[in-house]
Image: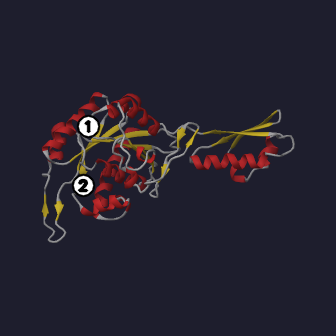
Amino acid sequence: MNQEQMIACLPAELAGRVKSARMVGERAVVVVDASGLSPAARAATEQEISAALEGREGVAEVRVAMMADKVRRRLIAIGSGKGGVGKSTLTTNLAVALQRKGLKVGVVDADIYGPSQPKLLATEGEKPRAENDKLIPIDSRFGVPVLSMGHLVKQGQALAWRGPMAGNALSQLVDADWGDTELLLIDLPPGTGDVQLSMLQKHKPDGAVLVSTPQDLALIDAARAGQLFDTGGVPIIGLVENMAGYACPHCGEVSDPFGKGGVETAAARLELPFLGRIPLSLPIREAGDKGEPSAAGESEDGAAFRAIADRIADWLAREAA
């Protein structure tokens, strides 16, 4: 069979993707343009081409090679100096908000010891498969693929890993087969430990977002996280103030249990952009527990996340220009 005969055996939508087709002895070798195809679609394409050619006269074996333009994938780290400031919830909602703007966004849950993303993106209990020694991310119902150590270990299992093991685990998640994902948000563990250092050495982010509550203790720790990124040459996209103001559900009066404006003041002092504030809100907490990110809906709380996502998208566009 020659190239024209082999292509004629294929459905039109597949034939248009064939770059070349030739016989090497009794082996049919077909090179396919896989640009824009998800891992599942690439596997289906390979199977369909093989099925169409196997058994044809003179064809004893079919080999399909996938070729695609390499995606320019950018990494944004979401970090904080201490735990409990809402970093994971912010990461989830920013990913959903950016996806709604048309970006192809994935989430890496790098909080090896306390993964939250399986619950926040409603993928608890799901296990990723592997192809060609790479993990295949799990698709959430919000259009955001995700990988977490929480997908790889038994639910509730404690990990007692030293630094190198944690760093290797992060590499497996970041180096997975993310397909045509353009942007990875990396939900970092709190602090400035081994996982952060491994990331800076092996997977230097294009930028970082720091999140803190307004109280002084949280701001001190956030400043340490900022120094780590600065030392590693990672631009700080901006600061987010979380748990900023609580509106009483009965009378509507707003109080500030964690203070007010501290992060915005710190951003001005450090000459860094202030990206916005997220309220201390019961609906945000309930939405996270249900695996229904606020940014996926049209609530006022969701609008706060979307406004911050708009500023991050503007930063990405400027950096790409």
Residue marked by disc 2: 278
Q: Nearer the viewer, residue 263 or 178?
A: 178
> Hey, what amino acid is under mark 2?
Ile
For label 2, the SS is loop
- Marks 1 and 2, how far apart at CA: 21 Å
Residue marked by disc 1: 191
Q: Nearer the viewer, residue 310 or 176?
A: 176
| 18 displayed left or right of 211 | right
Query: Which label is found at residue 154?
Result: none
Q: Quick one: label 2, few (<14), some, or many (20+) residues within 10 Å?
A: many
Q: Quadrant of residue 318?
A: top left
Instruction: Decide: is 189 above or below 297.
Output: above
Closer to the observer: label 1 or label 2?
Answer: 1
Residue 271 appears in the picture as rendered: no
Residue 161 appears in the picture as rendered: yes
- Where's residue 78, x and y in %? 32, 43
Q: Earlier in the sequence, mark 1 or mark 2?
A: 1
Q: Residue at x 20, y 38 (%)?
A: 221
Residue furthest to the right in view is 57
Q: How many marks?
A: 2
| 66 displayed left or right of 1 | left
> Hey, what amino acid is under mark 1?
Gly
Q: Quadrant of residue 280?
A: bottom left
For label 1, the SS is loop
